[in-house]
Image (tube, rainbow, N blue to C red):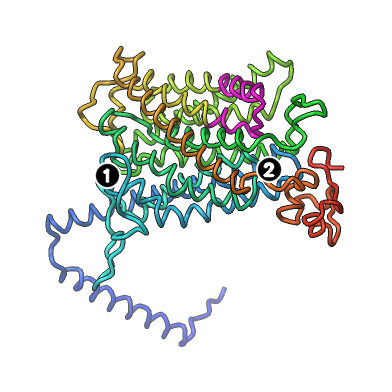
Amino acid sequence: MMFKLPSKRLIRRMSSLAIATLILAMFGTHATFAQDAPTVESLASDISSMKASIDTSWLLLTGFLVFFMQTGFAMLEAGLIRQTGVVNALLENFIDAGLTGLCWWAVGFGVAFGTTSNGFFGTDLFFLSGAITFGETVEYAKYGILNVSTITFFFFQFAFAATASTITTGAMAERTDFVGDLIYSAIIAVLIYPVVVHWAWGGGWLATQWGFHDFAGSTVVHTVGGVIALIGAIILGPRAGRKGPNGEWLPLPPAHNLGLATLGTMILWFGWYGFNPGSTLGAIGYDGLMGLTVLNTTLGASAGVCVTLLFVYFRTGKWDLASTLNGALAGLVAVTAGCGFFAPWASVVVGAIAGVLVILAANLIESLRIDDPVGAFAVHGACGILGTIAVGLFAQPQLLFNGPFAAGAAYAGQGGLFITGDWNLLIAQLIGSGATIAWSAVTATLMFAGLAMVNRLRVNPIADQIGIDVYEHGASAWPDVFPLNQDGAGEATEKGNKNTMSPVTGD
């Protein structure tokens, strides 16, 4: 066998690469030894920078998951309501994110996390003032004791704020004036929600004076959203088709697309792995706590799913999907306040109780003739209150003061009543829940009553005849099932006599 010698051209290329590599190694080695020896200060600075980068990455990643929950809420609501309100529900959920982003940047974040005024609300950080300084270099201010910048913290909290107003849309679906939705969403973002945030998380009176604990938002997010949703549904009144010809209360219309509802619930469960673990507000030093919150979140949801499924089956003899979906959400909401404070067994207990409570609360709301199409109050309001109280019953004292929202060493040793026999934490939790309910109910009543007075709460009665999607948006989510005439939307809006699509039957 004969071997062909390399060509001269190939030899020249290989020689050039070898020479270049030798030169690079010589000068690279020289440059490395020419550097100043590291000092204690430079090493400390490098370590601090690394910690900030890790914490920032963690907070942004979990914030992205929380923001993705907006998709879950949209899919869940769209699936649980009737066909003729789907476009309206999707747009309301979508615009809530954008509108809340601007309102939270301008006012809400400052009210929630600015310098406190007697523990009731913040007084600075509006428009993120001082968060970024442009001089010879760009400087990003850190927020308080956290290891992340104020603007990173802002984004994470914005994702939570968007959730609070989105909860409300579900209870008021299919009959709310769209302009009214924009107005009440803005008010929630700049006033109602951030005040409660300040009380519990922003250095306010609940945490500092009473030792109130809410790890990730059973009170701050879910109780606020659930109570506002309930007040809105009461003042707004029921959807068309909920009362019979003699005024009798008709059964809740069935969900029109359980596939969408299931998809939405799974997205929400997935997003909760940002909602709860992300509330450590950092990764460095919280590795065990992050794992615990993930475990407790999983166990709470799992218990809620299983208990609701069995509870409804023993009552009706049917394996009910829609109820089971809300059972998962009930368990998630209930463990949110204590996911960083519970031993795992307590999360199973709390999730199981929530699985029963969500059904009983939904039945109570129906018996009072309050039309809540997605069970928003039962899931978020009732189970949010349960989760808040559960901290006062089951919290481990060794876990209470981990994390940046710890109330302080003055409350050390005050675990849950069933763990330590101490009533102090339970009293603090009851006060915090009661104050949040009162604030949310009063402000929501004023807000919705004001919108009703100026005819911006309930959509025009024509929408009850033709469907809110046609009236408000001139669109249908299912044009192959509910086709619109070329001029049907416009004429229906003006006269109400062209498109007679029933919001109840779809005929």
The amino acid on which the numbered mark 2 sits, given as a three-letter code, is Arg
On whether residue 69 falls in the magenta region, the answer is no
Where is residue 31, by image quadrant? bottom left
Total count of labels: 2
Q: Going 25% across and 46% down the picture, which residue do you hit?
A: 145
Q: Residues within 10 Å of mark 2 (few under 14, many from 20)?
A: many
Q: Nearer the viewer, residue 102 or 416?
A: 102
Q: Going 55% across and 26% down the picture, which residue do you hit?
A: 302
Q: What's the magenta bit mostly, secondary-structure-wise? A: helix
SS for tag 1? strand
Q: Nearer the viewer, residue 372 or 329?
A: 372
Q: Residues within 10 Å of mark 1 (few under 14, many from 20)?
A: some
Residue with the mark numbered 1 = 117
Which percent across, then down, holds residue 150? 32, 54
> Quick check: 386 left or right of 469?
left
Which percent across, then down, holds residue 156? 41, 48
Alpha carbon distance from label 2 to label 1: 39 Å
Q: Earlier in the sequence, mark 2 or mark 1?
A: 1
> Quick check: 339 left or right of 329?
left
Q: Nearer the viewer, residue 40 or 2?
A: 40
Where is residue 238, by image quadrant? top right
Residue with the mark numbered 2 = 175
The residue segment tinted magenta is 355-380
